[in-house]
Image (cartoon, rainbow, N blue to C red):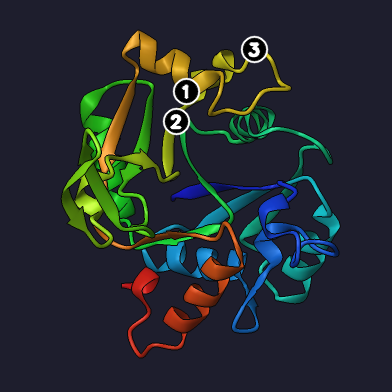
Amino acid sequence: MLTVGILAGGLGTRISEETQDKPKPMVLINGVPILGHLIQSLRVKGAENFIVAVGYKGNVIEDWINRSGMSDFVKVLDTGHFSMTGLRVKKLLEYFDGDRMMITYGDGLANISLRKLIDFHSQHGKLATVTAVRPPARFGHVEIIGDQVVRFNEKLQNDEGWINGGYFVLNKSISNYVVDESLPFEVEALPTLAREGNLMAYKHHGFWKPMDALRDKHELETLARQESIPWLE
């Protein structure tokens, strides 16, 4: 039985137009919170139970879960109004009974194969796996030598490298790497794991889309109206 922890406690300051009265995972995509789209996509891929780590306006998320009839398989874990991702990850791992747990962010969508991700983690034997994705190609790429443009490509994504796409698989002992609970997980624990050689990257080449700004919300709404919704594939 696959249980997924969802980090859903942030303030959502970069999309503050939508988060004055609700947390970021409750921003609507065609009438449904992005958290609802995320849970649906994870269930399609085999996840059965969820633990949502809430903070800022967590009562809004809890009320929605109860009203939507998901409380049988979605539990809410209050990690504090101003908690950072480090503390939220630690509390999720302590709350979960198993030896390892999949954890993701509550404000993005992807079509990642959970089975392949977990198999990858099992095979390498390290403490942690992060899904690496290509960043969205939002700007034209200009390569310059001196003052001369030697190459210009519109939205050249393949040259942008890899970034953290979330969708972690973490052994329970990762809790020991959260020493300063006031720091984000991405600032303290992940760099330490990387230095020790205990962090591996599962490279995802398929669909991945975060919701960082209103522009992203509108793009996700367009995708959600398609006959074939990319994060459900």
The amino acid type found where label 2 is placed reads Leu
| Closer to us: 33 or 100 | 33
- Going from N to C along the chain, the mark reached first, 2 or 3, is 2
| Closer to us: 44 or 17 | 17
Q: Which residue is mark 1?
A: 190
- Image vertical order of residue 211 relative to residue 92, above or below: below
| Closer to us: 96 or 221 | 221
Q: In which quadrant of the rendered view does residue 153 lie? A: bottom left
Mark 2 touches mark 3? (CB < 8 Å): no
The C terminus - image quarter:
bottom left
The amino acid type found where label 1 is placed reads Leu
- Going from N to C along the chain, the mark reached first, 1 or 3, is 3
**Residue 167 horizontal/vertical position (percent):** 43, 45
Looking at the rendered structure, the secondary structure element under dot 1 is: helix
Mark 2 touches mark 1? (CB < 8 Å): no
Q: Which residue is mark 2?
A: 170
**Residue 164 horizontal/vertical position (percent):** 41, 39
Q: Which residue is mark 3?
A: 179
At a point 55% along the width and 15% down the height, the residue shown is 177
**Residue 20 horizontal/vertical position (percent):** 84, 62
Q: Is residue 149 left or right of residue 88?
A: left
Distance between mark 2 and mark 3 Cα atoms: 16 Å
At a point 65% along the width and 83% down the height, the residue shown is 31
